[in-house]
Image (cartoon, grey):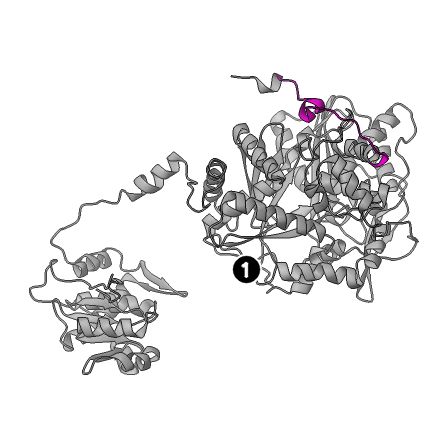
Amino acid sequence: KVDRKALPKPTLQQVQQVYIAPETATEEKLAGLWADVLGVEEPISREANFFEIGGQSLKAIQLLSLIRQQFSAELVVKDIFLTPVLADLATLINQADEQQQSPVIPTDRTGLMPLSHMQQRLWFIDQMEGSSTHYNMPLAFNWHGPINIKTLQQALLTLVARHEVLRTQFISQGGQAYQQVVPVPKYFPLPIHDLRDETESEQQIKLTALYAQADQPFNLSGDLMLRAQLIRLDDTQSILQLNLHHIAADGWSLDILMNELSQLYLAYEKGEANPLPTLAVQYGDYAQWQQTWLQGELLQAKIDYWQTQLAGIPQVHSLSLDKPRPVMQQYHGGLLETAIPHEVTAQLKGICQQQGATLFMGLHAAFAVLLSRFSGEQDIVVGTPIANREQAEVAELIGFFANTLVLRCDLRNAPTYQTLLGQCKDTALKAYEHQQVPFEQLVDILQPERSLSYHPLFQVMLSLAQTAPENQETEGLPITPIDLYKTGNVAAKFDLTLHAVEQAETISLGWEYCTDLFEASTIERMAASFNQLLISLLANPEQNVFSLPMLSATEQQRLLMDYNKTAAEYPKTASLPGLFEAQVARTPDATAVTFNNKSLTYATLNQQANQLAVILQAQGVGPDQLVGVYLERSIDMVVALLATVKAGGAYVPLDPNYPQDRIQYMLADSEPVVVLTSTALQATLSEILPVATNTLCLDAPEIKQQLSSQAFIENPVVADFTAQHLAYVIYTSGSTGKPK
């Protein structure tokens, strides 16, 4: 085997193959921006392709922000996808109109300030549900080596002073929510728990309790939005746990937090001054900018797009649930970790690159097929997070900027994977163009049917990150992240979330699911099917996505062979009524049939069928005599079928949804002794019923009275009745157009 980890990483020049120096000032500046965004030090060729040398959606958005700042050019994300070559993009920049979007600038932040749209929703949820931990963002790290507690406190206090949102309180005045920055505290509270004298097993027990204790609700009107605690395990091992509220931070913010904490701690430990540059703006400036800029015709144009794009979407997904959906949404979660092998990852990246799509777009297309195959739905809706930091001024701010985009996938007409990938690419690019509309505002505008039991607009989420948290740089601090999921701290904000993390050669997957809805075994099957489906899609990108296998050989054996080994010995001479009556004797009180929250036990079902069987026998029903059953799906229909065979007859099912001429032919051809129906259906039936055919309405008062009577509850006896007599007569569609 090739030791891939031992191989040197390909250089930029190897990827570019031939280096051609930038020729114009715009190309030179643009090459510098590419280098900043992609984190490369080697010179970038004017013929380099942004996506071939490491670009993806998030980096394209970052690049767009820098282009607007550097060139004042009004471009959109789609422009970078359509012109990914540096020289071509430079030409487009020179031809572009001057940008219309105003920059974020410092404002007066001394008084009450509006909340951003994203913050408003979380504040509203906090007011409605009361303080909870649903929107906490806990982090934990193993700290290797000695730790200077005073230096750590100083670094944390500097962060709170530097990022005003971490010392912002959220208050209500006159029914309106505001944010207000409070003065920098004199010190940063850092509880210290000393477990150095405990045994390892005692430490583990207390650690679990301390994790839970630290993950307490925030008081939005009085707390700092950053908490920390330190747990000492021995003289050279500690655990640093941090917690933020989502109203003050997002995923991007966590990277900023840890990088700045590292720089501050290392500088202060050496006796140096704060090494971080002064921030030009604060989150409060962004909130006021958003309220001012995102309005009027600009906002309406973006809203119009979403109203058209999301018109008529399903209220809730159609995935089969293992448990009844709770009346109020619960957040109990589980996590299954899997991975896409490096060979499949390479294939996926290859086909995405061929179509000018990103890895996220390729995953979205495959995930949509999986959801469609598991649900039977062809209108697939998922949510996805987006950084939403289009302004270069806010790139270094901690705060809640992230937005949620709703992506819709149309799988009607049995598309190929290539076609679907193109659709997902187009959908994503348009969504990025209109990403500024806050999800909260979108919900208010679209006004979907609201329910406390599920998330509005979508309940399934897909996210892609470039590197795993354990691989992120922390600028020299001797720490490694702790996976809090593995400590049992899993909160599922959605029914199902697929977290994908792009690594060097593989894609790791985290299947986060709501345990109030799904069993772990269901998610395991779904995860296994996803990997198999990916293999099939990539091997056959031009075939109908519904025709491709998504079951492994093991799963096929289980479903097609093992689960279908249903052969069993039974008394060959026994009749169908006799077999049922034997089951009644064994389990009289067990549930036999359920429909629309109504159930009958075996004993009650048998009793009602016996009553009706006696009525049918009085109508002349006996061995091989036919009884028409013209009923909607219901418990009465089951009683009718069972009563017919107990009377010795054979039933003829007549679906009320069939065309009238079809039913009329079946009635004339079968000549039933009697037809069982309901009052609601009798009027329609009478128009097509052959002359002199008798009918019985099971919901007619006289019939209902007889069925509820305690008389004639014994199993009816039919003379000379054997297992060879007819049980039913079924009409097929018929090749001539007439049923047969």
User: Residue 630: horizontal and vertical position, in percent?
Assistant: 28, 72
Q: Quadrant of residue 565?
A: top left
**Tag 1 residue:** 314
User: Residue 467: horizontal and vertical position, in percent?
Assistant: 66, 32
First to last magenta residue range: 7-26
Total numbered labels placed on residues in the image? 1
Decide if residue 729 is on the left or right side of residue 25. Answer: left
Residue in the foreground of this view, choosing between 569 and 591: 569
User: Residue 516: horizontal and vertical position, in percent?
Assistant: 52, 50
Q: Quadrant of residue 443?
A: bottom right
Q: Amino acid at mark 1?
A: Pro
Decide if residue 555 is on the left or right side of residue 321. Answer: left
User: Residue 44: horizontal and vertical position, in percent?
Assistant: 76, 28
Q: Residue furthest left?
A: 720
Other-residue count near label 1 (Cα within 10 Å), few / some / many at <14 / 14–19 / ≥20: some
Residue in the foreground of this view, choosing between 637 and 440: 440
Q: Indicate whether residue 15 is drawn in magenta.
A: yes
> Does residue 134 show up?
no
Decide if residue 289 is on the left or right side of residue 253. Answer: right
Residue in the foreground of this view, choosing between 424 and 225: 424
Secondary structure mostly taken by the magenta-highlighted segment of the chain: loop
Say what secondary structure mark 1 lies in.
Answer: loop
Residue in the foreground of this view, choosing between 527 and 6: 6
**Residue 174 vertical position relative to residue 586 in the rendered view, above or below:** below
> Does residue 721 show up?
yes
Q: Indicate whether residue 111 is drawn in magenta.
A: no
Viewport quadrant of the C terminus: bottom left
Residue in the picture at 78% in, 31% down: 35
